[in-house]
Image: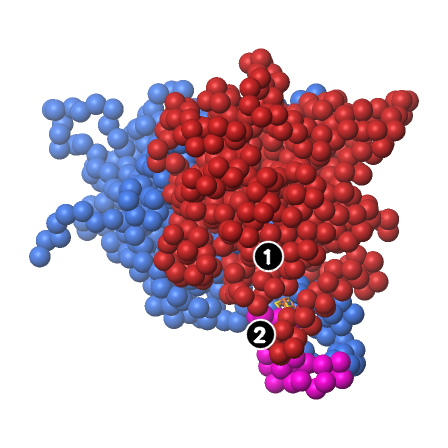
Chain colours: A blue, B red
Amino acid sequence: MQETGYRRFKIESKPAPHAYPIPNKFDVSARKVRLAGMLLHEAFEYKFKKEVVLSRPCIYGVFGGRFGGFKPIKQKCVGCMRCVQEYPHIMRVKPSDEYKRLGDSFWTPEMVYTIWNEAATGKIPVKGMGYKGAFGGEGFDGIWTDMSEIVRPTRDGVYGREYISTSVDIGRKPVHVNFEKLDHTPTTLEVPVPIILDELPAGTESDDVSIAVDRAAEQVGTLRVTGKGDHSQANLPIVDEKQIGEYKQTPRILEFDAQEQGLLDKLLSDFGSTILIGRLPLKEDTSSMVSELVHRGVHGVHLYADYHGWDYSKEPRHISAALKDTHQQLVREGVRDQITIIASGGITLAEHVPKAIICGADLVGIDTTVPVALQSEFHGETQNRENCGLKPRKIDPAWGTQRLVNLMSVWHDQLIEILSAMGMRDVRRLRGDIGRSMMDSELREQSFKGIAWAA
Amino acid sequence: MGSLELIVEKHTERIHHGLEVLPTLKHGLPAGLGNKRWTGELILATYEQALTGELPMNGLEYKTGNSGGGFDVLGWKSHDGVAKVDEDQVDLSISLNKRGEGKKIEIPLPIYGGGMSFGSISLNFMIARARAAKKLETYTSTGEGGYPDQIVPYRDHVITQVATGMFGVREETIQYAPIVEFKYAQGAKPGLGGHLLADKVTSEVAKMRESSMFTSLYSPFPFHSVYSVEDHKKHVDWIKTVNPRALISVKVSTPTDVDMVAIGSYYAGANIIHIDGGYGGTGAAPEIAKKNIAMPVEYAIPKVHEYLVSEGVRDKITLIASGGIRTADDVAKAIALGADGCVVATAEAVAVGCTHCGNCERGRGCQVGITTTDPELSQFIDPAWGEKRIVNLFNAWSKRLRIILAEFGLASVRELRGRKDLLVRYK
Ligand code: SF4
Ligand code: SF4
């Protein structure tokens, strides 16, 4: 039966616990002789009342095992520090070495943990008692999004009453309709979230991972970019000149290397109704290259930085700066609305999605986050696209699918948090709206103007 | 004494003992304590000040954190050659009503307590804060969770907060209040409203908030009756009708147009504009909101101050800053950036043993009885003990404020306002 009526977009999450044990965040240990002495002392002090003597300082059950504090159940520790407060001469709690070793120079242990937990639970990370991290920073960390004191829509958008759209269109939008050539009107493809799964980093794709990524993209209704010639519904294949002939039917959407001379023209002539997205590394001349592609008829561009979010300029810029540059150039030329910009590289946390969109992307592609969510192991730096230090582990594709669906679900929810705080009903309105963001570097100069530098 | 009482007594004594011993560093600096904003040293220094009422003497860092920005990269200019004033003569009082009309209220130190609601914090901690406010002759705020009977005896020092959920807002709670605070937004979850998890909605909390037990409570965002400054003015009129004596405070977050919001609030009749930056505390908030939405208060203060000056109304409204004020130095820096004074909440929690661990919403709530409604855990904070520690903390802060002012030759904290020239920036 044909589905009719209104359906609120929601990505259903389900628990998908870690398949491989994760490092304990905290290392808890007791000085055993002192612990024994304390127990003896308390036994006399509390007249051998067992429930009082054995009442532990930990409400999380770390000392709830058979050997109590002599063998703490470290994985239960949440670092509340009450045991240290109560027994400073006995207890030691510190971030574990395994935890501190997680990630690389870009992926902090906190980021890895965040992605793992989002993929496992599908729930927005919530904590009490205020922010605990660094003040502002570089790249996306140096951008704050705006909020509105009094406008709708509201947080109710998340919980029920008002709808906030996160859909975006991929493809070329005509500036006017040519009634003579209605059959040549380019199509667009709508995805319900401004996030696609970019080509997996080299060396992280096993068959099972590939199945999981495919199914997750399909379940969410988005796309996965792949260099493989497989034409499933969710795929956004990357083609080279040789592969063009292999297509028996006209594909609905393709990515191609926009640096390859003549490829766009060939694709335009062979696949008139296909949405054509040119892949380009972000560097100094990207703006002019994109501008030229627009004039030659491209429908969209996929601009990528390295996996740490730095572009390929001689003096690398963060993807946020590089995107702004290209977006604003196209705005100046009056062609920005005609094409779609997909951005990827270094977009690894939920907050990076709205920030990349504010900087000018229509939507983003995520890359290293996918293997991280699937518990791939870090073996060195992840920056390099040709040699990314993530090694996949064996996974069950159903588990992998759920992990990625959870991730998309929780990123979608967080995007709605950001949009609702700004009073925006549609993510499309956020694109390039730099006025709804605040830059650390600019605010610092404005607000600290007149304050001398320390000698 | 039954076992349960003994257990509570045992842990209470142990926690109190730990809060005394840890700042001595006899057992070293606990490696797992603290974070970039509230470093382990800052937490221990706060314990020490709450214990003694004095500034730490053993080298513990008590002035700044390690966040790499904001207050943490600001310091004080050299005061060589400046004629010092006598510390004891320095006046720390500020006025909370600078308008020509209405009750004149002054507080003897440029600090009052921020809203922390019944339900998100334990009743004992709430009473401790109210008692401390009375002792210090300043104020504390109910937060949005209603007005428990147990704090009525301190009502001359309690600000009634009217937030979007209107929980526990009743005619008498407005009439009790010397100051009524409209919470339009909160820095830690700007634009998102409040959320009290189901586990914390015990029968008392549900009764107070006129809701159902163990059901999550959301306060909407924004006020569904306010979509303009004119609507806000109607809100002010409503409060003034119920309680003509009350001063009006407007608590807002820090969007790009925070300066416009401030001037709008002034023209709608506010006595206090209270700007709450994103790095402050809360019972629970999405991490994405705390880190990413709205600007830190360090940037918002000069923006608002300078705009109010340019509009010619700066001396008719009190500008209060909150959201990440951890130390006396933060208070002084906020004032030098342009605020009249500060609202503080997290530091009060640290005074009674908070480790800034962030587990407030996990399981039974706070393990040391601060952000919990668990009947056993709540007992760790005896209101009289909590009162003493909060009073001590602010006494120590007052000493530090006097030192800063005296060294610059300033006889009153009011002279520090907007004196950015006394600050220096570190790279
Ligand atoms: S730090 Fe807290 S959670 Fe960890 S063992 Fe100690 S009391 Fe338990
Ligand atoms: S749970 Fe942790 S952060 Fe929350 S109030 Fe208690 S000690 Fe502080």
Mark 1 element type: helix
Tell me if residue B332 is in the magenta stretch.
no
User: Dot 2 falls on which chain?
Assistant: A
The 10 Å Cα crowd at callout 1, few under 14, some 14 to 19, many 20 or more, is many
Residue A163: image location, x then y, percent: 28, 42
Is residue A4 visible in the rendered image? The answer is yes
Which residue corresponds to mark 2?
A: A61
User: Dot 1 falls on which chain?
Assistant: B
Along the line of sight, the residue nearer the viewer: B206 or A414? B206
Q: Residue B70 sits in which quadrant?
A: top right
Along the line of sight, the residue nearer the viewer: A372 or B98? B98
Tell me if residue A45 comes above or below residue B243 in the rendering: below
Which residue corresponds to mark 1?
A: B124
Q: Residue at x 31, y 41 (%)?
A: A164
Residue B69: image location, x then y, percent: 66, 37
Mark 2 and mark 1, same subunit?
no
Q: Residue A137 sits in which quadrant?
A: top right
Tell me if residue B294 comes above or below residue B379 in the rendering: above
Q: Residue at x 40, y 20 (%)?
A: A332
Q: Residue furthest left?
A: A1
Is residue A243 visible in the rendered image? The answer is no
Tell me if residue B147 comes above or below residue B190 in the rendering: below
Viewer-nearest of discs 2 and 1: 1
Q: Main secondary structure of the magenta part?
A: loop
Q: Which residues are magenta?
A: A43-68
Q: Quadrant of the C terminus of chain A?
A: top right
Q: Quadrant of the N terminus of chain A?
A: bottom left
> Which amino acid, by three-letter code, is at mark 2?
Gly
